[in-house]
Image (cartoon, helix red, strand yellow):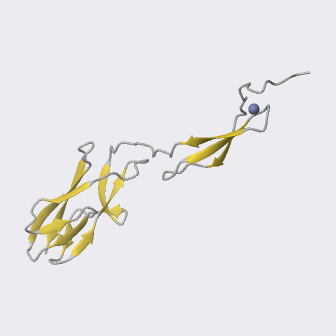
Amino acid sequence: MTVIAQYEEHIWDSGIVTNEPTYETEGEKLYCCIVCDATMTETIPKLIPDQVPITFIKISIGGSDVPSTLSLARNSTLQFDVLLNEGVSGGDLVWSVSDRSFATTDTTGRVTTLNKSGMVVVTVTDPATGISQSTILRIT
Ligand SMILES: [Zn+2]
């Protein structure tokens, strides 16, 4: 006959995940004692996105290559985006134009031309690595 002492430590099973963690919320795991009916819960940390560094940036428009000569009328807008190496979830890219008297850009790569014809260089940079790419915009 086996007597289990009242204050003997619980012996936990391997546990089951009762609540899967996400990138936003913690999860929970439930352990049951294999000797008595006690249970215990454990918090599972939030998921951490893979930290894949940017090694490649290519300016695109709607996921397509940018033509070698890109023309845009004065007083109009164009939304640029980027193609990055696989596994990168985005990051905080910085968009800039070479001459803000010709055009401006916002944080998403949306370029707005002003009422002035000329050429500007549009550049996107990953501040974490310094990797950048530029394209020339002819404002007509
Ligand atoms: Zn127990």
Residue 68 on image: x %, y %: 23, 62
**In-front residue for pair 105/11:** 11
Ligand 1 rendered quadrant: top right
Front position in the image: 84 or 37: 37
User: Residue 43's spot in the image, x, y percent?
Assistant: 57, 42
Image point (50%, 46%), residue name: 46
For this view, does 24 lie left or right of residue 136? right
Quarter of the C terminus within the rendering: bottom left
Q: Quadrant of residue 123?
A: bottom left
* Horizontal relation, residue 137 to residue 35: left or right: left
- Residue 136, given in percent of the width and then of the height, sits at 17, 61
Is 68 rendered above or below residue 92? below
On the rendered structure, is 100 left or right of 82?
left
Residue drawn at x 10%, y 69% as measured from the top left: 102
Residue 111 sits above or below residue 43 on the image: below
Q: What percent of the width, then of the height, locates residue 81?
A: 31, 62
Position of 86 with respect to 110 (left or right) is: right
Q: Residue at x 37, y 63 (%)?
A: 63
Quarter of the image containing the N terminus?
Answer: top right
